[in-house]
Image (cartoon, rainbow, N blue to C red):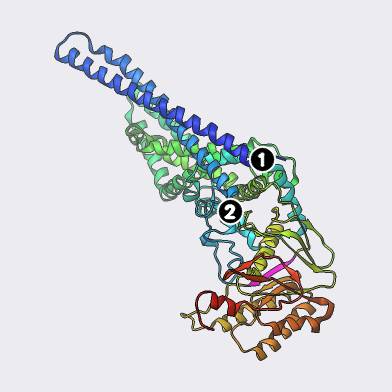
C-alpha cells in the first residue's frame, strides 16, 4: 500500500524548491546579461568615441552574452516545467482532499442530452466525473476517456484495461512527465485534421518524376559549373529552361503539399514529444503492449518517423531565405522536398490516426491509473458473465468528499430484479441512484469503483433522474419524462441486460394513472430481464413490489426532527417508509400548516 498524499506532498515540496532555485538563477543570469550589455556599451563608447582601445573587445563580450543567453533560456524552460509539475501535484492533492472542482477539464463538449445516462449521472461538466478523472493532455486522450464513460466495454476489454491500469498505477513519474511536457497541447493539437491529412491521397506519387527532379538538379549544378569554367552560358540557359518547365508542370501540386504540411507538422511535433515518452516505457500487460506496438511503422518508432518529416519541413521553411530564394529554383528545392514529404506521407501518413488513437488510449488508461493511485482503497470490480448481477457492498459516490459520503449496499440478481426506494425529501434517494449508476460506469469502463466490493455482469445503463420541462420545445416535465422512459424501455430490448435508475417515476400525473402506468412499465422491464431501482414519494407505488413477488423489494431512507431541524443518516433500510417529513419541513421554515 502507498500513501498518495505523502508522495504528492514530498514531490510538491521538491518541485517548489527547485522552482525557487531556478528563479534565483534566472535573476542571476538576467543581471549578468545586463552587466555584459553595460560593459559592451562602455567598450563602444571608449573604443569609437574616445579611441581608448580597439573595438575587437566586443567579440569576446558578444560571445559571453550569447553563452549567457543560451544558459538563461535553458533555466527559463526548466523553471516552466517545474511550475507545471507544481500545478500537477497541487491538483493531485486537491483531487484526493476534495478541492478539485473547477481545476480540471470538465469535458463540456461531450455533454449529450439524448444520451441514456451521461447527463443524469453528471459525467461531464463542472464538478463532473470526467473532471475528477481526466489528466489527459490531448484531445485524443479526452475523447477516448469520454467514450469509455459513455459506453460499456466487453468483459475481456474491461479486464484488459484493469490490468493496464494496475501496471500504470505506480508510474507517477510518467504521469508527471506527460503533464510537464506540454500544458497547452490540448488546445493546439488538431487530431482529426492530422489524421485526415495523413490519410488523404498522395499528390506526388511518381517515382520516375522524383528521380528526374534529382537528376535535373545535379545536371543544373554541372551546367552552372561548365558555364563558369568554360564560358558556355548556353548550357546553363538550356538547363534552366528544362528545370523551369519541370517546375511549372508540378507547380500547383507542390504548392499544395508545401502549404498543407507546414501546419500538420507543427501539431505532429507536439505529439512526437509525448510519443517519445511512451516509447521509452516497457509494458507487461497485453493491453499496453498492444497499444505500444501501434506506435511503430516498419519497425521504426513514431517519434523517429515524425522527426524525419520535421527535417523536411525545416528545409522547406528555408525557401524564404535570400540565398535559397535565389538559387533554390535552379535545383528544384521546393519541388524535391515536396516529393520527399509525399513519400513520407505515403509510407507513414496512414499510421498517424493509429498513433493518435494509441496516445489517446494511453492517456485514458493513465487517467484511470491516476485515479486508482490517488484512491488506493478503491478496488476493481469483479466482472461476471453468467446471468444478470449487480452486487455492491459499501458503495459511495466518488464525487462526494469521503467525510460526507455514506456507504450503502445494493444487491440485484438471483431473482431480485427491482428495488423500490421510498423516503422523504433530501433523505438520499436520488444520491443512491447516482451512486449505483456512477459506480456501474466506472466498473464498465475498466476503472476502480468507490465501494468495498462490486460484482456485476455487463449491463446497458439507462437513467431518468434530471428530467426537466422544456419551454422552447413546449414540453411539460411529465411529457419529457415519458419520452425518456420510452428510450430506456427500448434499451431493454438490446443485446445487454438493462440496469435502469428511475427517480420519482411518472411524477407529475395523478396517483391513479401513476400507479397503473408505473406497474406496467416496471413489470415489462423485469420480464425482459432488466434490473434496477426506482425512487418514489408516493407510497402507492411501494405496493407494486407485492405484485412482483420475490422479484421486487421495498427499501427506504429515514429522517428525524431534532430541535426544529430535519436530520438524515442516509442509511438504506429494508421495507417501505412509514412517514413523510413534508408537513414538519414546512412548519420548520415557518409555514402555518
> Quick one: SS at disc 1?
loop
Q: Residue at the spot x=51%, y=82% of the render? A: 592
Q: Residue at the spot x=19%, y=12% of the render? A: 47
Q: Give the numbered dot on residue 396.
A: none
| Mark 2 vs mark 1, CA separation in Å | 19 Å
Look at mark 2 in the image and give the residue it sits on.
Answer: 132
Q: Residue at the spot x=61%, y=72% of the render? A: 465
Observer-nearest of 567 and 98: 567
Q: Tell me which segment is drawn in magenta.
A: 459-464
> Quick one: SS at disc 2?
helix
Taking 285 as reference, is 591 left or right? left
Residue 163 visible in this rendered orientation of the protein: yes
Rendered view: 151 above or below 576? above
* Residue 558 location, quadrant: bottom right
* Dot 2 crowding, Cα within 10 Å, few <14, some 14–19, many 20+: many
Residue 145 position in % (x across, y down) = 61, 55
Which label's residue is closer to the chain start, 2 or 1?
Answer: 1
Look at mark 1 in the image and give the residue it sits on.
Answer: 3
* Residue 541 location, quadrant: bottom right
Is residue 70 part of the magenta span, yes or no? no
Amino acid at each position: 500500500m502507498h500513501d498518495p498524499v505523502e508522495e504528492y506532498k514530498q514531490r510538491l515540496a521538491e518541485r517548489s524548491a527547485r522552482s525557487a532555485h531556478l528563479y534565483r538563477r534566472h535573476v542571476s543570469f538576467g543581471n549578468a546579461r545586463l552587466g555584459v550589455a553595460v560593459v559592451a556599451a562602455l567598450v563602444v563608447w571608449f573604443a569609437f568615441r574616445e579611441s581608448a582601445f580597439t573595438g575587437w573587445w566586443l567579440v569576446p563580450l558578444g560571445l559571453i552574452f550569447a553563452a549567457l543567453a543560451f544558459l538563461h533560456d535553458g533555466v527559463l524552460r526548466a523553471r516552466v516545467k517545474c511550475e507545471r509539475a507544481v500545478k500537477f501535484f497541487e491538483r493531485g492533492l486537491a483531487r484526493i482532499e476534495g478541492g478539485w472542482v473547477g481545476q480540471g477539464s470538465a469535458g463540456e463538449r461531450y455533454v449529450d442530452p439524448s444520451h441514456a445516462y451521461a447527463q443524469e449521472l453528471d459525467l461531464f461538466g463542472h464538478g463532473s466525473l470526467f473532471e475528477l478523472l481526466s489528466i489527459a493532455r490531448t484531445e485524443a486522450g479526452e475523447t477516448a476517456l469520454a467514450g469509455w464513460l459513455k459506453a460499456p466495454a466487453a468483459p475481456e476489454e474491461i479486464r484488459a484495461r484493469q490490468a493496464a491500469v494496475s501496471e500504470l498505477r505506480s508510474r507517477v513519474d510518467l504521469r508527471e512527465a506527460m503533464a510537464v511536457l506540454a500544458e497547452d497541447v490540448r488546445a493546439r493539437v488538431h487530431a482529426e485534421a492530422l489524421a485526415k491529412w495523413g490519410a488523404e491521397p498522395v499528390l506526388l506519387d511518381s517515382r520516375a518524376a522524383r528521380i528526374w527532379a534529382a537528376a535535373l538538379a545535379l545536371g543544373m549544378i554541372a551546367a552552372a559549373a561548365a558555364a563558369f569554367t568554360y564560358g558556355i552560358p548556353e548550357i546553363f540557359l538550356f538547363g534552366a529552361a528544362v528545370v523551369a518547365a519541370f517546375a511549372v508542370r508540378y507547380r500547383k501540386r507542390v504548392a499544395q503539399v508545401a502549404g498543407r504540411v507546414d501546419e500538420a507538422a507543427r501539431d505532429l511535433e507536439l505529439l512526437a514529444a509525448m510519443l517519445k515518452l511512451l516509447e521509452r516505457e516497457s509494458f507487461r500487460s497485453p493491453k499496453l503492449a498492444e497499444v505500444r506496438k501501434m506506435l511503430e511503422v516498419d519497425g521504426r518508432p513514431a517519434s523517429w518517423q515524425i522527426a524525419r518529416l520535421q527535417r523536411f519541413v525545416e528545409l522547406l521553411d528555408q525557401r524564404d531565405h535570400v540565398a535559397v530564394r535565389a538559387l533554390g529554383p535552379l535545383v528544384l528545392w521546393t519541388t524535391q522536398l515536396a516529393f520527399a514529404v509525399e513519400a513520407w506521407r505515403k509510407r507513414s501518413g496512414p499510421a498517424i490516426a493509429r498513433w493518435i488513437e494509441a496516445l489517446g488510449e494511453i492517456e485514458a488508461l493513465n487517467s484511470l491509473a491516476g485515479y486508482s493511485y490517488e484512491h488506493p482503497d478503491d478496488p476493481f470490480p469483479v466482472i461476471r458473465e453468467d446471468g444478470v448481477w449487480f452486487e455492491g457492498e459499501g458503495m459511495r459516490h466518488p464525487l462526494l468528499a469521503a467525510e460526507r459520503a455514506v456507504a450503502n449496499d445494493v444487491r440485484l440478481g438471483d431473482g431480485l430484479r427491482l428495488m423500490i426506494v421510498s423516503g422523504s425529501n433530501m433523505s438520499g434517494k436520488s444520491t443512491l441512484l447516482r451512486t449505483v449508476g456512477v459506480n456501474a460506469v466506472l466498473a464498465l469502463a475498466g476503472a476502480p469503483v468507490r465501494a468495498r466490493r462490486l460484482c456485476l455482469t455487463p449491463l446497458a445503463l439507462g437513467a431518468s433522474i434530471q428530467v426537466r420541462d422544456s419551454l422552447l420545445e413546449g414540453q411539460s416535465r411529465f411529457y419529457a419524462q415519458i419520452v425518456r422512459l420510452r428510450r430506456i424501455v427500448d434499451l431493454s430490448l438490446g443485446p445487454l441486460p438493462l440496469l435502469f435508475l428511475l427517480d420519482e417515476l411518472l411524477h407529475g400525473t395523478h396517483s391513479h394513472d401513476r400507479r397503473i402506468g408505473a406497474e406496467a412499465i416496471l413489470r415489462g422491464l423485469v420480464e425482459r430481464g432488466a434490473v434496477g431501482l426506482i425512487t418514489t414519494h408516493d407510497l402507492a407505488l411501494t405496493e407494486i413490489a407485492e405484485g412482483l413477488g420475490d422479484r421486487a423489494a421495498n427499501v427506504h431512507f429515514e429522517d428525524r426532527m431534532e430541535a426544529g431541524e430535519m436530520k438524515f443518516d442516509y442509511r438504506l433500510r429494508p421495507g417501505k417508509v412509514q412517514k413523510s417529513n413534508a408537513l414538519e419541513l414546512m412548519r420548520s421554515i415557518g409555514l402555518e400548516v
